[in-house]
Amino acid sequence: MTTRRALVCAPLVPEFDKESGSKRVFDTIALLQETGWRVTFVSENGAGGERYERLLNRRGVATYRGFGRRTEQLIAGGQFDLAVFAFWYLAERHLPDVRRLSPETRVAIDTIDLHFVRNARRLFQNVANCGAPLDAAYGDELTRELNAYASADGVLAVSQKEADLVNDLIGDPALAHFAPDWEDLFVEPAPIADRKGILFIGNFRHPPNVEAAEYLRRQIVPRIDAELLKAHPIYIVGNGLTAALCKKKLGPPGNEIRIVGWVPSVIPYLRRCRISVIPLLHGAGTKRKLVQSLMCGTPAVSTTVGIEGLHLTDGEEVLVADDAERFARGIERLIADERLWKGISEAGRQKIERSHGRAAAHKRWNRAIEQIMLREPKQIAHFEDEPSGERSTPADYRRLKQRIRDAVATCIPQNSTVLVVSRGDESLLQFRGARGWHFPRTTDGVYAGHHPADSAAAIEHLETERAKGGEFLLLPNTAVWWLDHYRQFKDHLEHRYVRVQFDSSLGVLYDLREPAIRASISELAFAGKD
């Protein structure tokens, strides 16, 4: 029997021990290998992921960094039966190349979560009364996300609810498939008498987790009995807990809140703590932190958003509370009531094992992959690279990027550092005589993988990167919608910094340096154009 070949593509190398989306990518690779596939992996940005690349290599997975001539040759000659893209925006950029170079390859997009759902909830949540927050920028991104799914041969969703939503919107009942996250936690639950503390787990590069931690600290904790918190302090565990974030969002650590940060495994904390909390206010998809908690026999208090897609019942497998007062009372009840604790611990563990245990999840995944492989691959289609709605081919986009790089080189001094709203595209950072940094990016210099949560987050990140040496900010024309979407961010730029004369068809360029230097360079730029 001929070995089937799969290409798995993600924005970053899967850091499976740091955040849920990466673990899902890593688990996808592992599942394909276990079912006989030969797997190749491409990360759009591989910076900082060397340890994880070595782990993939030891599993027999060939790894590549970046999309370019080398990966085009790989796709053209690789005879891939299946390509899986993690996140719609990565498929938007690179699916057309797979169609063009390997038209027989079936293409699937793993949503990880539905961005248009998460973003709509965030926008509505932040508007009081009868506001209308869904603007043209949101509509453009929604259109692009759905177009990407419609261009694939299959879509993998973390819940049946999200799979059904995609199928209803696109009008193809066989396009999206429920492919759940899974955990393989063979641990004996610790008895209640051996457990102390309240656990919050999250990847703090993900804005909903930051928001949830702040909500917990500022609105829920003050409502919890102080004596209970002395006996059961709150442990904050997760990736991306920077000192600045803790200071601004969580306040100083104390006896009731203990900042842990990243740990190699959350399982010891899940087994040691009496309960876990998932106080998410917005989001989409399903929450791996809740799956892990229930599998370890650790009962949880969650919001409705936190249990979404898992078919859990309030009072039976979990406690649900959507306001701070009820959430605090739920924490107190679950800690103090041993009978309630034991009932929810056992029922939650059994329920989640049936839906998100290894055997059940693998059965669904294998069925989804086989159904995708039975479909005829779709014909090549163009994507909308710009939110303005102009259609362009991959070749058009490459030419646009070269024009942007050429224009920037004529507008800034040698050896300058340019922050670029890049969507993770490494080629947008390749300036002649200048350094390009992704915006936003992580503390390791890697593309953050998402847009800022709001203008305040964009401004804070801008000033942080400026303090580190960022001298210019470039918004290519594929990102100028930021100036409509993040209106306070635009006001901040316009009032504090000078807009450099730049071809408006290519984007917008701001000078972030000191005013005196900035003025002289701007005057020279204008003089040169006249």
Image: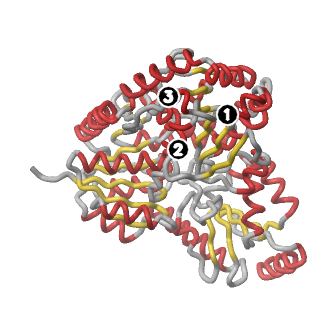
Q: Nearer the viewer, residue 176 or 389?
A: 176
Q: Residues within 10 Å of mark 3 (few under 14, many from 20)?
A: few
Residue where numbered disc 2 is placed: 144
Camera-nearest residue between 429 and 42: 42
The location of residue 31, given as percent across then percent down, is 30, 45
What is the C-alpha distance between the residues marked 3 and 1?
15 Å
* Color theme of the render: secondary structure
Residue 156 visible? no
Measured as percent of width and height from the top left, residue 42 is found at 39, 61
**Foreground mark, 3 or 2?**
3
Which numbered dot is residue 191?
Answer: 3
Q: Residue furthest left?
A: 1
* Foreground residue among 505 and 512: 512
- Considering only order in the chain, which callout, 2 or 3, is on the residue closer to the N terminus? 2
Instruction: Indicate the amino acid at tag 2.
Output: Arg
Residue at x 51%, y 15% (from the top left corner): 316
Q: Residue furthest right?
A: 516
Give residue 448's position: percent from left, percent from top.
Answer: 59, 56
Residue highlighted by disc 1: 232
Q: Helix, strand, or loop for circle 2?
A: helix
Q: Is residue 231 above or below residue 377?
A: above
- Looking at the picture, which amino acid does disc 3 mark? Pro
Q: Residue at x 61, y 26 (%)?
A: 301
Please determine whether, in this image, residue 300 is positioned above or below residue 263.
above
Label 3 vs label 2: CA separation? Answer: 49 Å
